[in-house]
């Protein structure tokens, strides 16, 4: 078969698409560049917001419209939470992804049976919350690789559908994680981004605490050939003093941390069931900055959460200013049926859009300020692509950089790590003069 892949949503989804791509290739199938040319189209769906659900359903219908003869596969969170309500020949959700190749091959032999509305008989797969190990997965990016170590979430924030889509926390085995890290480094990947649905819960299902993640990171940090170790989203409540101290001891840790906030208002955080307050969040930020003075701090913030007043929104704006985030991912609240927040008093759409615009404006200013403050600093950049006499990539603290070399110097190649001085900025990006 020729197989086309479309990924919506988070880094974990991207990792799982890479894994599915590898599974198809290992069975002798080929990749298609366009759905029109594919015998099978795999859409890895997202359900984090209502808009993500809508787009997921739209993309599934589009695959069938572009190519009536293709096998449409619905994988991922939206396929799990809207089971039976999507236009697909195979619905795999989050629990049956390891069966996709077998089921697609079966349907490929029965091409005349396709309807794009029929969920063919699903295999008997355990619904128990257990980690589905894809084995070692190579990213197509070439120098940076995501590595998934955990799935599921036990938090049940009032706005979130993900625990229902992914299930409870399920951790990958220590040995499998280390094995993949060695495999990635051996295959030339300089940077590993350790990811999960609720990363700080790694080991929780085995009765372990946050230091289980710290021990795993220490082992990955010692993998030969690895030059950068980066972390996915972290939870403030899990960032203990001992864990932060353990991060400081890592040789290859990148000084960029995504610490999920969601709101700077304590009353909103309580309605969200977030289990921390703004004071506790700020204390974790101070400790991180004590250990990593030049770090970048990024976060997620939801505006227009049910019941959010003007005063509560201003609390979030002020907290964001005081904290000095390098980047803010802004999300207008999206109602998710089946969650507690869906039953709360909703904020008008017009108000949500106004608040989104204001926070986005602040986020843009904070990002530019952070870049300006890097001027004159010595930084390293992992090159990802080249254009003309410039190379592009990210600094250790995850700021996009243009690396400028003198005409007589050899242009860095993708995968090279170059050092230099930040000489200027372009908005939220920096310009680094290569000193090699």
Image: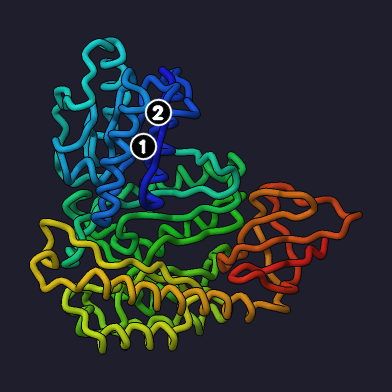
Residue drawn 25% across and 10% down? 112
Q: Which residue is mark 1?
A: 134
Q: Which residue is mark 2?
A: 23
Q: Is the N terminus in the top left, top right, bottom left or bottom right quadrant? A: top left
Check disc 1: other Cα within 10 Å, few if <14, some if 14-19, many if 20+.
some
Compare marks 2 and 1 and give the one earlier in the sequence: 2
**Side (left or right) of 19 relative to 114:** right
Residue 236, quarter of the rendered image = bottom left
Q: Secondary structure at mark 2?
A: helix
Residue 422, quarter of the rendered image = bottom right
- As drawn, 270 above or below 431: below
Residue drawn 46% across and 76% down? 361
> How far from the left and from the top, in percent, is residue 436?
82, 61
- As drawn, 125 above or below 323: above
> How far from the left and from the top, in percent, is residue 197?
31, 55
**Side (left or right) of 112 relative to 194:** left
């Amino acid at each position: 078969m020729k197989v086309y892949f479309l990924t919506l949503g988070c880094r974990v989804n991207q990792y799982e698409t890479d894994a599915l791509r590898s599974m198809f290739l290992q069975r002798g199938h080929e990749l298609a560049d366009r759905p029109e040319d594919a015998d099978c189209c795999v859409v890895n769906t997202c359900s984090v917001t209502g808009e993500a659900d809508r787009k997921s359903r739209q993309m599934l219908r589009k695959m069938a419209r572009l190519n009536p003869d293709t096998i449409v596969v619905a994988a991922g969170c939206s396929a799990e939470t809207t089971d039976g309500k999507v236009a697909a020949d195979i619905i795999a959700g989050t629990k049956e992804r390891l069966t996709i190749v077998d089921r697609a091959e079966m349907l490929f032999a029965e091409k005349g049976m396709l309807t794009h509305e029929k969920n063919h008989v699903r295999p008997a797969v355990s619904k128990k919350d257990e980690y589905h190990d894809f084995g070692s997965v190579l990213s197509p990016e070439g120098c940076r690789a995501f590595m998934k170590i955990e799935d599921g979430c036990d938090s049940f924030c009032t706005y979130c559908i993900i625990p229902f889509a992914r299930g409870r926390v399920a951790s990958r085995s220590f040995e499998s994680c280390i094995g993949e890290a060695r495999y990635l480094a051996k295959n030339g990947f300089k940077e590993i981004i350790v990811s999960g649905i609720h990363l700080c819960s790694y080991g929780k299902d085995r009765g372990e605490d946050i230091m289980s993640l710290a021990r795993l990171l220490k082992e990955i940090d010692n993998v030969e050939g690895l030059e950068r170790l980066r972390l996915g989203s972290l939870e403030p409540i899990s960032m203990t003093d001992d864990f932060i101290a353990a991060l400081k001891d890592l040789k290859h840790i990148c000084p960029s941390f995504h610490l999920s906030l969601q709101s700077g208002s304590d009353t909103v955080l309580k309605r969200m069931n977030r289990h921390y307050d703004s004071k506790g969040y700020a204390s974790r930020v101070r400790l991180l900055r004590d250990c990593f003075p030049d770090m970048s701090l990024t976060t997620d913030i939801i505006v227009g959460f049910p019941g959010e007043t003007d005063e509560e929104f201003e609390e979030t704006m002020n907290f964001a200013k005081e904290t000095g985030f390098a980047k803010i991912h802004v999300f207008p609240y999206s109602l998710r049926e089946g969650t507690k927040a869906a039953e709360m008093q909703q904020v008008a759409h017009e108000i949500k859009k106004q608040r989104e615009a204001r926070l986005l404006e602040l986020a843009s200013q904070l990002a530019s300020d952070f870049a300006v403050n890097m001027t004159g600093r010595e930084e390293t950049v992992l090159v990802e692509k080249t254009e003309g006499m410039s190379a592009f990539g990210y600094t250790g603290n995850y700021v996009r950089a243009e690396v400028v070399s003198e005409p007589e110097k050899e242009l860095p190649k993708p995968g090279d790590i170059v050092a230099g001085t930040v000489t200027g900025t372009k908005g939220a990006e920096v310009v680094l003069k290569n000193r090699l």
